Image (tube, rainbow, N blue to C red):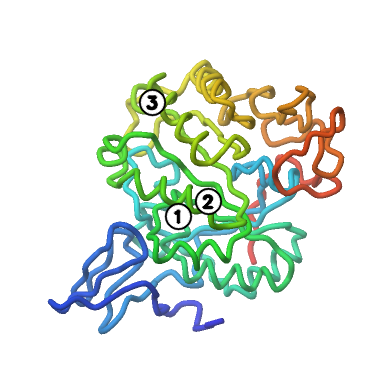
Amino acid sequence: MFSPSPVSPHPGRWWQRLADGRIECLLCPRECKLHEGQRGFCFVRERRHDGIMLNTWGRSSGFCVDPIEKKPLNHFYPGTSVLSFGTAGCNLGCRFCQNWDISKARAYDRLSEVATPVTIAASARRLDCRSVAFTYNDPVIFAEYAIDVAEACRALGINTVAVTAGYISAAARPEFFRAMDAANVDLKAFTEDFYHRVCLARLQPVLDTLVYLRRETRVWFEVTTLLIPGENDSDEELDRASDWFAANLGPDVPWHFTAFHPDFRMLDTPRTPPATLARARRIACSKGLKFIYTGNVHDPDGSSTWCPNCGALLIGRDWYKLEAFNLVGQHCHACGCEIPGRFGPQPGTWGPRCQPVRL
């Protein structure tokens, strides 16, 4: 594992030299083509001499111990704590970004915490965290750092979680996800128009990432869609998205519909009504999808896990607090139906706390 000074630029991977002298970054579908000194769209990957340098290796915007359900992951060691951190920058340009102060950061003084992969892994163990999560901004853009942290965590028996928009190239997917134990992937919408107009990106690479995770990896993953009134919440779009989800990911992958609140450059858009989330959940369930959740609203029914066979309550949730846990191993206590996911013999006891920490 490469271990440079935590404050020095780190050599980047996934690039090629072009005939015109520029260097093309191959990490994500943007394929930024850079002259000397130029930075990619993500801002943190820079052309220096004959290569790409990552300027945020070993640097973080801060650390927090969260419930795993906040990522959100409902089928990955429920009730356990996760050490969460991010860096700066992003390779999408979402107008509704709800972590815009981090993901849109253009000044490295946002990165007040310095931590090597070994320090992060050791801190997670000291804090009794079951996992480490790369979140707040997209770990794809700091893939080298995330992979190094994941390797250090794996050596100590600690899981790693990527909270990502899935906007990563086919060339980089295998190495990035090989290092991860779990992921939550944002499916922002189900139209190319939305991705182009609202996120400055494309839909198809995200769909490709989801199919790759389902067919080519053992990574436990769940999907999140933030429903924005008038933008991606129509019956027609939810119906098509649910059909695609069922056909390509299958009925067992959990899908979270979460509520939008006005932020960043969409301050005039109203909040998502709870009824919209309930409607989306009904549409997805009507397609045979078994584990559909609602989030960012108080909805114990929509945030709990129910047996798809007999309807028994398996994991009761009130916000991020577990109210009931009725799994026996990985099976429904009432009918024995096997429930997909990663579960321990007992749930964690972290609760709903979100506790900032210094390493």
The image position of residue 46, as x and y in percent, is: 30, 72
Q: Amino acid at mark 2?
A: Val
The image position of residue 54, as x and y in percent, is: 39, 72
Element type at marker 1? loop
Q: Amino acid at mark 1?
A: Asp
Q: Which residue is mark 3?
A: 237
Quadrant position of residue 85 = bottom right
The image position of residue 199, as x and y in percent, is: 32, 43
**Real-space Cα separation, disc 2 to disc 3, in angstroms:** 24 Å
Quadrant position of residue 18 = bottom left
Does label 1 or label 2 sit earlier along the sequence?
A: 1
Does label 1 or label 3 sit earlier along the sequence?
A: 1
Image quadrant occupied by the C terminus: bottom right
Badge 3: residue crowd in 10 Å (few <14, some 14–19, many ≥20): some
Quadrant position of residue 11 = bottom left
Residue 125 against residue 268 in the figure, above or below: below
Taking depth in this image into account, of 132 and 305 the one nearest to the observer is 305
Instruction: Report if the CB atoms under discs 2 and 3 are less than 8 Å apart.
Output: no
Element type at marker 2? strand
Instruction: Report if the CB atoms under discs 1 and 3 are less than 8 Å apart.
Output: no
Q: Which residue is mark 1?
A: 138
Q: Give the number of the mark in front: 1 or 3.
A: 3
Q: Amino acid at mark 3?
A: Glu
Measuring 49% from the left and 36% from the top, which residue is drawn there?
A: 247
The image position of residue 45, as x and y in percent, is: 34, 68
Q: Looking at the rendered structure, which numbered label has been put on residue 296? A: none
Badge 2: residue crowd in 10 Å (few <14, some 14–19, many ≥20): many
Q: Give the number of the mark in front: 2 or 3.
A: 3
**Real-space Cα separation, disc 1 to disc 3, in angstroms:** 25 Å
Q: Which residue is mark 2?
A: 163
**Real-space Cα separation, disc 1 to disc 2, in angstroms:** 7 Å
Instruction: Report if the CB atoms under discs 1 and 2 are less than 8 Å apart.
Output: yes
